[in-house]
Amino acid sequence: MRILLVEDDYGDAALVEDALSSAGIADILHHADSGQEGLAYLRRDGAHPGARRPDLILLDSSSCLEQRRA
């Protein structure tokens, strides 16, 4: 399974990566550290011209909640 993880907190990203690896879920995991990089990956822009579409996208939920509350 190809997973795109969009997470700006490297500690949180490491926890998710470890959990997915331990569970044997993610064959390929790409970590984008911002929403802009995540979109570039999905659009195959910039440094991601050969990116394959992920099966699952995991978004940084804390940033989404913070923006919704603002």
Image (tube, rainbow, N blue to C red):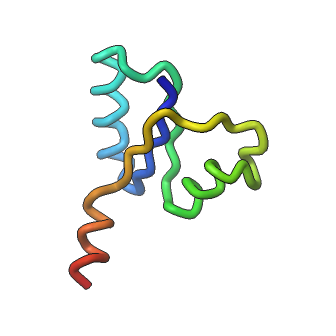
Query: Image point 34% across, 55% down: which residue?
Result: 60
Query: Image point 31% across, 36% down: which residue?
Result: 16
Query: Image point 72% across, 45% down: which residue?
Result: 48
Residue 14 x %, y %: 35, 37
The image quarter in which residue 22 lies: top left
The image quarter in which residue 24 lies: top left
Apparent side of residue 59 relative to residue 61 in the rendered image (left or right): right
- Observer-nearest of 56 and 4: 56
Residue 31 x %, y %: 50, 42
Apparent side of residue 64 relative to residue 44 in the rendered image (left or right): left
Q: Furthest residue to the bottom? A: 70
Quarter of the image containing the C terminus?
A: bottom left
The image quarter in which residue 51 lies: top right
Q: Is residue 14 above or below residue 27?
A: below
Query: Image point 59% across, 57% down: which residue?
Result: 39
> Count the marks: how many?
0
Residue 45 x %, y %: 74, 54
Q: Is residue 39 above or below residue 66?
A: above
Apparent side of residue 6 relative to residue 28 in the rendered image (left or right): left
